[in-house]
Amino acid sequence: MGLIQFDFSGAVDADYGVTEAQIADLAPKLLDLRQQIVDVAPPFASLPRELLDGYTELRDDSPLGQIFRVANRLHDEVDAVVVLAGGGTYRGTQALRDACCDPYHNELSRGGRGSKPRMYFTGNDLDNDASSALLHRLGRDLTAIDPVVRRWAMVVIDPAGETRERALALRQFLPALQESLADDVAQWLPELLLPVTDQPSKLRDLAQAIGCKEIFPIPAAIDERFNVLSAAGVLPAAMLGLDCVQLLEGAAAMDEHFKTAPPETNLVLQYVAIHHLLQTHRGIDRRVMNVWGSALETFGLWHDQLFAGSGNQTLPLTTVSPRDGHHLDPANLQGKVVNHLIVQQHRADPWQVGLSDGDHDGLNALSDRKLPDLMTEAIADIDAALHAAGCPTTQLRMPEIDTHSLGQLFQMLMLATTVESRLPRDV
């Protein structure tokens, strides 16, 4: 499979963007930083290849094999999964579901979901009403005749076992899980409570006291903003039936590309160069991830958390076009770079406008047009308007939304954030 594409031509402009000479001047420093990062090998960067190699060698006895074994078992045992996670972990895991599953996955029948569980996310805030509503929703199935429909599992993600919001959520949801199992609690609780944590940790101690059959490792050395390609993200993704091998293959391919591609074709280094130069030479202090398609909105929110925690003074913002067009109004563009995230191939058959009796909305002139074509035109029109207003833009293009492309995208932005965080502001 090919790599995703990064087109930064909309940011190369002597009047409002950067110049090719500036990019070339920065290249030696970026190569030095790349070598430093390759030599140190951040745990998140090497993890996808390590998981894949371990699975090739040990199969079921590997960490990835353990994930697949448990996920496949639970497809036949539960109808819902609650993921308790905090911060960046929460958004990364949710982004995988929102990008790859049917937008109304949780509303489909069990058959319509292919026996994959409904999935809910909590544990990242102190929202009393939201957690109470989720507990109520889970309780609605306790009267079902089918025992599988009555059962739900809980994935608890906390490397150190000390995240306050996650711990409070566990105090709410663990008693509810125990109560839902009634007389079968001793049999099922060790099967349905799935901790993802480091060793040692308070969460691991609790899991061992309960007698949990499976505890999934996650290195505390990996910041939670960077752990989407660890068990924290891969276990829930596997429960949803997503192709996790391709997710990790995509990430590993991007890691290899970062290590070996020259600056003029290296997506990670190009991304860093453009944004760093816009910040240092143009004073641009806001980065808009403008997503063309609601399936990737949560991915944008994950990136917001990833970048906001890097120490960079530039503010990230996710928008969905054309829904959030007011954010791209020329009056609001000063100090912004707009990064379009575009999917080139859609999953559903293209919808055609068609003819309407009376032409009440005046759209019959577009009757032979299809929605993806209109979106392509809208992207070009907005880009032209942004450039006319002196706003630099870039385009990240995915061939389609699949786990391989998502793995690339996750890894690319994590690597880019790591490189840029080490780049002096005055370079």
Image (cartoon, grey):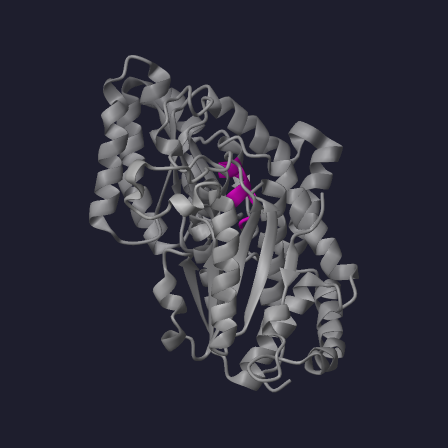
The percent position of residue 121, horizontal first and vertical second, equals 37, 43
Horizontal and vertical percent position of residue 407:
61, 47
Front position in the image: 166 or 348: 348
Name the residue nearer the viewer: 416 or 318.
Answer: 318
Using the image, determine if residue 277 lies above or below residue 379.
Answer: below
Image quadrant in which you'd find residue 244: top right
| Residue 45 sits in quarter | bottom right
Q: Main secondary structure of the magenta part?
A: helix
Q: Is residue 75 above or below residue 24?
A: above
Q: Residue at x 34, y 30 (%)?
A: 107
Q: Is residue 317 magenta?
A: no
Q: Residue at x 46, y 38 (%)?
A: 352
- Left or right: where does residue 193 sit relative to residue 52? left
Magenta extent: 228-237
Residue 112 position in % (x across, y down):
42, 22
- Residue 131 found in image quarter: top left
Residue 314 image offset from top left, x and y in percent: 47, 75
Q: Quarter of the image for the C terminus: give it.
A: bottom right
- Residue 159 visible to the viewer: no
